[in-house]
Image (cartoon, grey):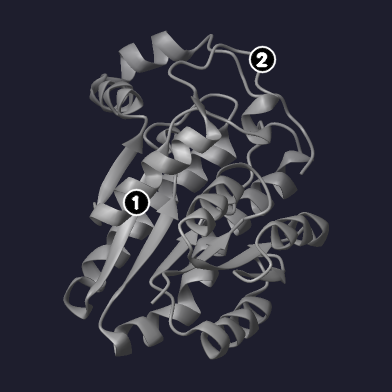
Amino acid sequence: MALRVVISGASSGIGLALAQHYLRQGALVAAFARRAELLHALSQQFPHQVHCYALDVRDATAIQAAALDFIAKAGVPDIVIANAGVSRGTLTEHAEDVQAFQQVMDINVMGMVKTFQPFIAPMRAAGKGRLVGIASVAGFRGLPGSEAYSASKAAAISYLESLRVELRDDGIKVVTICPGYIKTPMTGINTYIMPFILEVDDAARRMARVIDRGSSFAVVPWQMGLVGRLMKLLPNWLYDWAFNKAPHKPRTFI
C-alpha cells in the first residue's frame, strides 16, 4: 500500500520539496497551502497522487474538512507534516509589528495545532502514525530582530514535546525537526551569512530520513545542532555580548 502523507505549506520551500520527495517515492500526498495556483502546478506533475487543498492553516474548519476528505479518499495518513510557517523581522517597539507578531504566532504555532488536530483520533484508532512538526534552530534562543519568529519556534518545540509524551502509548510518534538555514524564499531575503546552508532538496531528503527513523528530535543539518547546543550553553552575559550587534532579518510585511 502506498504511503499516505499530509503536508502543510506544500506550495513552496521545504513543504514543496518534501511533497516532491514523497511523491517520487510513490506516496499519496495531501498538499495544504494558501496558493491554489502553485498547488495546481504540483498536481499537474503528479496528477494521480496529489490531493490539493487550498486553505489557510489558521482556518480550523477548512483543515477539518480537508482531513475528512483525504481520509475518505485515501485512508488514515501515515505521516502528517505541519510545515507551514512564516518569518519576518519584528521589533516590539513598532506598533505596526504587533499585528505581525499575532500572524506569526497564529501560523507557526496554532497552525501546527490545527493541522494535527483532526488526524490524532483516526491515528489513535489505527494504532500508528507520525506527526512531524517543522520548528527551527531559531527557537533555541531568542534572536535579536526575530522576536516573533524565535518565540513561535520555541513554543512549537515545547508544544511538540508535550504532544510526544501525551501520545507515547498510542502508537503515534511525534517528530520535531529543527532546520538550520535552507535555501528557500524565506531565507532569500536574508542579507547576512548563513552557515551550513543547504539546498532545499537535500534538506528534504535528510528530513525524510529523520521521519522514517521516527526520531523524536533532530536538527538539519546536524552541524547547526552543534551551534544550537552551544548557544543554549552560553551564559546570558556572554550570549548578550555575542549577539547584541548581530544582523537582523529585514522587517517585511506578511
Q: Position of residue 9 (x, y in %)?
A: 62, 55
- The circle on residue 208 is none
Is residue 182 shown above or below 81? Answer: above
Q: Position of residue 153 (x, y in %)?
A: 46, 45
Q: Earlier in the sequence, mark 1 or mark 2?
A: 1
Q: CA distance from mark 1 to mark 2?
A: 28 Å
Question: How many marks do you count on the picture?
Answer: 2
State the residue in front, 129 or 243.
Answer: 129
Q: In what element is the residue under mark 2?
A: loop
Q: Furthest-left residue in view? A: 169
Residue under the image location 52 percent in, 85 percent down: 71
- Image quarter where the N terminus lies is bottom left
Q: Amino acid at mark 1?
A: Thr
Determine whether, in the image, residue 214 is placed left or right of residue 9: left
Q: Position of residue 80 (x, y in %)?
A: 45, 66
In this orientation, does residue 92 appear?
A: no
Circles 1 and 2 in contact, beta carbons < 8 Å: no
Is residue 16 shown above or below 240? Answer: below
On the image, numbered disc 1 is attached to which residue?
176
Determine whether, in the image, residue 125 is placed left or right of residue 111: left
Residue under the image location 61 percent in, 86 percent down: 69
Q: In what element is the residue under mark 1?
A: strand
* Picture quadrant of residue 132: bottom left
Crowding at dot 2, Cα within 10 Å, few <14 / some 14-19 / many 20+, comes out as few
On the image, numbered disc 2 is attached to which residue?
191
Q: Amino acid at mark 2?
A: Thr
Q: Position of residue 254 (x, y in %)?
A: 76, 44
Is residue 240 shown above or below 18? Answer: above
* Picture quadrant of residue 207: top left
Crowding at dot 1, Cα within 10 Å, few <14 / some 14-19 / many 20+, comes out as many
